[in-house]
Amino acid sequence: MPNHLPDPADLQSWSRYVEDFRRAADSSVDWIAEYLTNIRSLPVLPKMNPGELVDALPAHAPEEGESFEAILADFRSKILPAVTQWNHPGFMAYFGTTGSTPGVLAELLIAAMNTNGLHWKTSPAVAELEQVALGWLREWLGLPPEFFGIIYDTASTSTMHAMICVREFAQPESRVEGYKANLVIYTSGQAHSSVEKGAIAVGFGQKNVRMVPTDAEFRMDARALRAMIEADLRAGLRPAAIVATIGTTSSTSVDPVAECAALAEEFGMWLHVDCAYAGPCALLPECAAHFKGIERAHSVVTNPHKWLMTPMDCSTFYTRRPEILRQALSLVPEYLRASEDPRAHHLMDYGVPLGHRFRGLKLWFILRYFGRQGIMQMLRRHIALAQQFAEWVDADPRFERVAPVPFSVVCFRLKGSDERNEALLEKVNESGSVFLSHTALNSRYVIRIAIGNIATGLEDVQRAWKLVQQAAEELQKK
Ligand SMILES: Cc1ncc(COP(=O)(O)O)c(C=O)c1O
C-alpha cells in the first residue's frame, strides 16, 4: 500500500504528492464532463434500502493510505448509486437547483486554497470579494446601497441571524442580561419552518411565534396581522418582528411585503423578508410587483444555492442595520484582535461562526460566467415551462390545480382522495426519470413540480406530465 504523506524535507515526495493529484483530478474532470453529459441515464432517486451503503463499506478506516484509483472506483460503484441526483434535469422535487460548471470549478479552487476569512487579514480576498459579489447581487435584488451583505451556509442560518437581530433591536440589554420573554414574531402559516426554528434557537419560544392566516391564494392576510399585533399589545406583549415570504415553500405564494413594511414601521418592528427561492426573480421586470416593498425590509435572505446555479451551500443575508448584527454578535478576544481600518471588513463580527468559507468566489464566478442576461433567460425559461405544465393540468378534467403559479412551481392534485394522490406520486417517482415531491395545502395532499435545473427543457417537463397521466390511468383502472 502506498503511503501518500509527503515528507516536507523531500521535494521529490512533495512533487509525487502533487502529481498524484494532477492525474486523479484530470480523470475526475473528465468524469464530471461525462456525468453532466449523460446525467439523464441515471435514476434521479437511488433504488436502495436504508443502511445498504453503510453495509457495503468497511466499518473501520484503513490503516494505510489507499490510491485515488481505488477510492474513485468505490465512488463510482458504491457511492454514486446511493446519490439522489439534485443536478438531474428530472429533479423537480422541493426546489429545482443547479450546481453549475463555474460553481464546480470555483469549489475546486476554494478547496485548494483552503483560505479562511475570519477577519480581513486572515484573507482579504474572502472579505472583499464577498462584498463585491454581494454588492452586484444586491443591485439585482433592488435593495438600496446601505444594505450590508454576508454569506452564510443556509437560509435557516440566515433567518436565525435575523432573529438574533430582532432580539438585539428590541432588547439590546439581552446580550448581557439574557433574554426577557415578551417578544412576539409574526409570520404566515405558509412560512418555512426555519422561521419557527430560528425563534426556538434564539429563545423566543414556539408559543411566541404567531402564524398569521392566509387568503385563498396562500398570502399572508395583512388585516389579520394587524389585529394579532394589536391584541398582543393589549395583552402586554411586545410585537417584535414580521417575517414575510416572497415564494413560500409549498405554493410559492407572495406575502404583501409593502403592507407588512407599513405595519413594521407603524409598530417599531423588524421586518425580515425570506425570498430564499424566488429572490433571483427580482431581476425580471415582469416579476417586479412580487418584490414591492422589499427595500423597506430590515433584513432579506435569498439562496443562490436554490435558483442561482450555485452549488450547495450559499445563502446571502442582507441587512440595512448591520450595526445591530454586530452589536449582537461581535466578541473579539486578544488572539482575534484585528485592524481598525474602516475598510477592513471582519466577517467574524457578523455571525455566530468564526470560520468563513470563500463562498464569495463561487458566486462571483457564476455571476460573471452567466451575466444578468444569462440568468434572466434561465429564470424565464423555467417560468414558461411551469406555465406550460399548469396549462396541461388545467386542460385535463381529472386534475385540479391548487395554487397560482407566480414562479416555477405548479401545485396540483388528482381529483379524489389523498391516498390516490400519494399512490400517483409514488408511481411517477418509481420511473427514475423524474422526482416530484408533495406538500399539504388546505389540509389536502398536493403534488408539486418545481422546475429549476439549468438542463431542464420542454422534453423533461413533457415526460413528467406523461408519467403523471399514465399513473392516473393505471389508478383509474384499479
Ligand atoms: C422559503 C424558504 N425559506 C427557507 C428555506 C430553508 O432553506 P435552507 O435549506 O437553505 O435552510 C427554504 C427551503 O426550501 C424555503 O423554501
Image (spheres, rainbow, N blue to C red):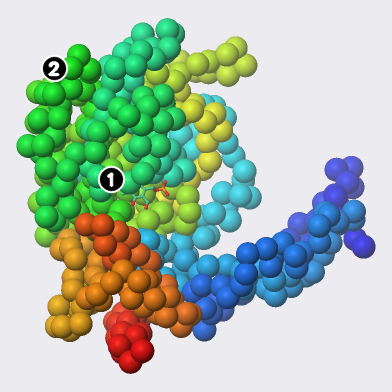
Amino acid carrying label 1: it is: Ala
* Residue 417 spot, x, y in % from top left: 28, 72
User: Which residue corresponds to the image point at 17% horizontal and 84% vertical from the top-left?
Assistant: 396
Q: Is 128 placed above or below 476 here?
A: above
Which quadrant: the C terminus? bottom left
- First in sequence: mark 1 or mark 2? 1
Q: What residue is drawn where x is 45% and y is 15%?
A: 340
Q: Name which quarter of the figure residue 300 lies in.
A: top left
Q: Between 467 and 407, which is closer to the camera in this rendering?
A: 467
State whether residue 283 appears in this view: no
Residue 10 seen in render: yes
Relative placement, left or right, of 401 versus 136 is: left
Mark carried by residue 234: 2
- Please name the residue that numbered disc 1 is placed on: 191
Front tag of 1 and 2: 2
State the quadrant of the N terminus.
Answer: bottom right
- SS class of the residue under badge 1? loop
Name which quarter of the figure residue 118 lies in.
Answer: top right
Residue lying at the far bottom in this picture: please name it. Answer: 477
SS for callout 2: helix
Distance between the alpha carbons at the discs numbered 1 and 2: 26 Å
Would the CB of label 1 be found within 8 Å of ligand 1? Answer: yes
Which residue is outermost to the right?
1
Residue occupying the point 19% across, 66% down:
402
Instruction: Say what amino acid the circle numbered 2 marks.
Output: Arg
Asked if marks 1 and 2 touch (Cβ < 8 Å), the reply is no
